[in-house]
Image: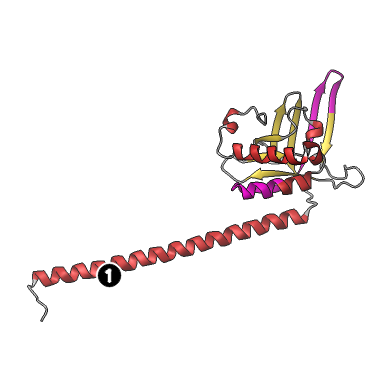
Amino acid sequence: MNELTKDKDLINSKNYTIIRDVLASLIKSEGAQSFYGNCVASADIIQTMLARAGVPSKIMECQVAIVKNTEEGRNFLFVGYDNYSYPGQIDTHTVVVTEEEHPILIDLSLGHALPQHRPVIVERVNGIEPTVIADLNIENARITYSEKKNLRLAQIHQKNLLQRMIAEQNTEKTLSVLRMLIIGAITLGGVNFIMNMTLIVLRLFDITWV
């Protein structure tokens, strides 16, 4: 599979290879076209597979503006904007964002609007403005992901909340174990200190056990 980005730092990052392999296996088994326009299912599948591969992520609702420069002029495509959808669709868009120091945005559902040889978006979250998640330039297209104010998919946020709860529980378990280890170490240290002091006192005053 060709590289999914031209960002060299991203290609050399810790999780990029895992993401590329996950997407390659999905595309090989299902075909990239099966994910086009189906952002909710594709985001859910990607998040599940990344979790199995050890890469934590979350699903985000957003809206996307795509401006393509062609010989005929500029073409515009708006995805996920309020009250702007086709029959049977929900006026929202979902992507996967990895949870790490430099988050990575993953979108497998916009391939119909992208160059044929780059049907997947795997790029750094780079939004400078408060409401912009990522502002990308991919060949002749500018793709802007913005925050979705009127959220449509409660189940996504419930799932993310559940994952945070599980993560917090795991953290609390880890902290409990650490507390026990620290208490044990302090106790052993205290016992050792008392024994040493006892030996010092016995030697100083030449006390012997009867």
Q: Quadrant of residue 104?
A: top right
Query: Is 71 inside the magenta-drawn segment?
Result: yes
Please give left or right for residue 57 compared with residue 152 in the image: left
Lateral position of residue 3 relative to residue 76, left or right: left
Horizontal and vertical percent position of residue 110 = 78, 36
- Residue lying furthest top in this view? 71
Q: Is residue 25 above or below residue 165?
A: above
* Quarter residue 102 falls in: top right
Point out residue 167 in the picture as x, y percentages from the top left corner: 59, 57
| Residue at x-position 24% and y-position 67% | 193
On screen, residue 175 versus residue 189, left or right, reads right
Q: Total label count?
A: 1
Q: What is the secondary structure assignment of the residue under circle 1? A: helix
Bounds of the magenta span?
46-75
Q: In x, y percent, where is residue 22?
A: 66, 41
Q: Nearer the viewer, residue 80 or 108?
A: 108
* Magenta stretch encompasses residue 43: no
| Disc 1: which residue | 191
- Can you say whether 174 is above or below 62 in the image? below
Residue at image point 16% right, 69% down: 199
Q: Position of residue 32 (x, y in %)?
A: 77, 37
- Residue, far left: 206
Q: Residue at x 11, y 78 (%)?
A: 209
Is residue 77 placed above or below 192 in the rendered structure?
above
Q: Residue furthest bottom?
A: 210
The front one of 134 and 11 is 11
Closest to the observer, 118 or 148: 118
